[in-house]
Image (tube, helix red, strand yellow):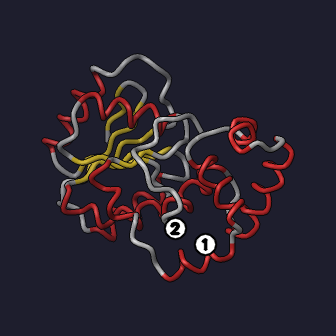
Amino acid sequence: MRVLSEVTVFADRPELQEKVTRMLSEAPQRSLTDVAVLAFGGATPVEQLQHCVSRLSRSYRVLVVLPEQAFDQVPELLRAGALGFLGTGCDQQEFHDALAVVARGAVYVTSGSRAALTGVSAESESVQQLLTRREQEVLRWIADGYTHSQAARRMGLSAATVDTYVKRIRAKLEVRNKAELTRKAIELGIVRREPLLTAA
């Protein structure tokens, strides 16, 4: 483990540690004290990776860097508490974008790993039936990073009405905050889009 530019870095391979270190040294200066980058190259068993994400997410906003062949682990890592996912072949710009999004508490899913999240499960079908069409629409806007007021303007509703919808959605999905709400929306396939680049 190393703390670089106020970002805590964990890597299971020296070459990944070097790559993340280099990209962090070139990152724009900003306060990232509660962000951890977990670089997984395949040397660590997947179960241990999930456990590590679960523990880290209690104290940090976690960005996971992993090889493409491990993208099928993204749904489990999302449930474990990770907020961002990048491939080990990511470039400097995508790394900076993902870091900035995760630092704000939003979810960043690289286009390559998004496919692992878009399969519709029996659970997602039942939850989508549980939410009304209007609740699903509100959830899409909120998961995309819009504030309640911004979502209300786009939907032609009052902010108070959107607040009420969000409370109902949280109760139905049993989630406590916006990050959990966004994770759930992605897991359920309600949000199918390019990586998030908007504020939480």
Residue drawn at x 28%, y 22% is 25
Label 1's element?
helix
For the residues labelled 1 and 2, say whether their Cβ atoms are less than 8 Å apart. Answer: yes
Which residue is at the far right?
160
Q: Mark 1 points at which residue?
A: 128
- Is 26 placed left or right of 133 in the picture? left
Question: Could you classify mark 2 by the number of other residues whose Cα lies within 10 Å: few (under 14), some (14-19), or many (20 or more)?
Answer: many
Which of the two residues, 14 or 147, is positioned nearer the viewer here?
147
Name the image quarter holding the C terminus.
Answer: top right
The total number of labels drawn is: 2
Q: Quadrant of residue 51?
A: bottom left
Q: Name the residue under label 2.
A: 188
Q: Give above or below for 114 relative to 129.
A: above
- Is 29 placed left or right of 154 in the picture? left
Q: Which amino acid does label 1 sit on?
A: Gln
Going from the N terminus, do you reach mark 1 or mark 2 first? 1
Which of the two residues, 7 or 143, is positioned nearer the viewer here?
143
Q: Give above or below for 133 relative to 88.
A: below
Question: Could you classify mark 1 by the number of other residues whose Cα lies within 10 Å: few (under 14), some (14-19), or many (20 or more)?
Answer: some
Q: In which quarter of the image is residue 128?
A: bottom right
Image location (x, y in percent) of residue 61: 49, 44
Image location (x, y in percent) of residue 66: 25, 53
Q: What residue type is labelled 2?
A: Leu
Image location (x, y in percent) of residue 171: 76, 66
